Image (tube, rainbow, N blue to C red):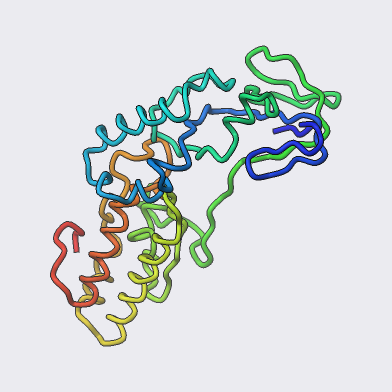
Amino acid sequence: MGELVSPNHRFGNIEVRVAERTLLSYRTVPWIVPLNVLGKPGDLASLGPASRLPFRLQRECFRMLCAVTVGRPGHYGLPAPTDQLWDRFVISDRGIREALKSGRVTARPAVAAFEGGCAVFSEGARPEPIDAVIFATGYERRYPLLDQVPPGSQSLSESLPFLLFHPTDCSLAYVSEAIAPCGAWSIFLEQGRAIAAFYAAEQRSSRRAAEFNLRRSLASPDVKGQWYQKEDGFHVDAGRYLRTLRTLSTWLSDGRPAPGLSL
């Protein structure tokens, strides 16, 4: 993204005071979805009764909602996404659609190189002079005392039971950032409860803690479902993950067995 929007223009909730023009470079065209659904925040919709509908029905209903509320990408300067909705993480519309439609932000394909103070783009777009670049490249996950994925595990997410616990060390747990179409706090809450339930079970010498430790190397329940098939295992179906964590907490607290959790 190169920042080169006239003074005092607004981009969403952010007032741009310096740049004369803003370019948005993309490698993969994202789906832009409404911030609110039927007057409620979108994350509440993702955790409501509709979250228990079959995934394909959820996706088709939301795709139609996006078509009505956000419109076709071509109307605001983006090509159509090549991925299905929710194959990858989506972008909530916090002003980007209107900024693209008004020309305050201009979309450009991926940057191929920087030459002579210009950004050179792929797909034949003309070079653009730029003064500053903001790299939105994401980040790399690293967890202290977990230097490498244990042998036999295919990924970091698969090596952490329930995306929380160390695969071999009973004294370690991580409140990992599971990514879902909702606010993170509800997930952090249930993750914290599950971790607390395990250590409480261990403190009272419950057989559930011992049973859990024997099964750390087994595969965790599927908390992704059909969501985010092109993203890593930390991208989850929020409703499924929350229900799984609640059931785990109940089981660790000597509640009813949870056969669906492979425990």
As drawn, is 76 to the left or to the right of 36?
Answer: right
**Residue 70 percent coordinates (x, y):** 47, 29
Q: Quadrant of the N terminus?
A: top right
- Using the rendered view, name the quadrant where residue 210 is placed: bottom left
Label count reads: 0
Q: Residue furthest top?
A: 124
Q: Where does the C terminus fall, quadrant-wise?
A: bottom left
Report which quarter residue 254 is drawn in: bottom left
Q: Tell me the residue at 64%/30% (across/down).
A: 99
- Using the image, determine if residue 131 lies above or below residue 78: below
Q: Residue furthest front?
A: 39
**Residue at the (47%, 31%) spot, across then down:** 31
Q: Nearer the viewer, residue 218 or 10?
A: 10
Residue in view at x 39 percent, y 35 percent:
86
Nearest to the observer: residue 21 or residue 237 = 21
Report x, y in % for residue 66. Answer: 41, 30
Return the residue nearer the eye: 24 or 232: 24
- The location of residue 109, given as percent across then percent down, is 63, 22
Q: Residue furthest bottom?
A: 204
Position of residue 245 relative to residue 157, above or below, is below
**In the rendered image of this protein, does residue 172 appear above or below residue 69?**
below
Horizontal side of 52 relative to 234 (left or right) equals left
Q: Quadrant of residue 106?
A: top right
Q: Residue at x 41, y 25 (%)?
A: 67
> How far across and how far down the image is residue 235, in percent?
41, 47
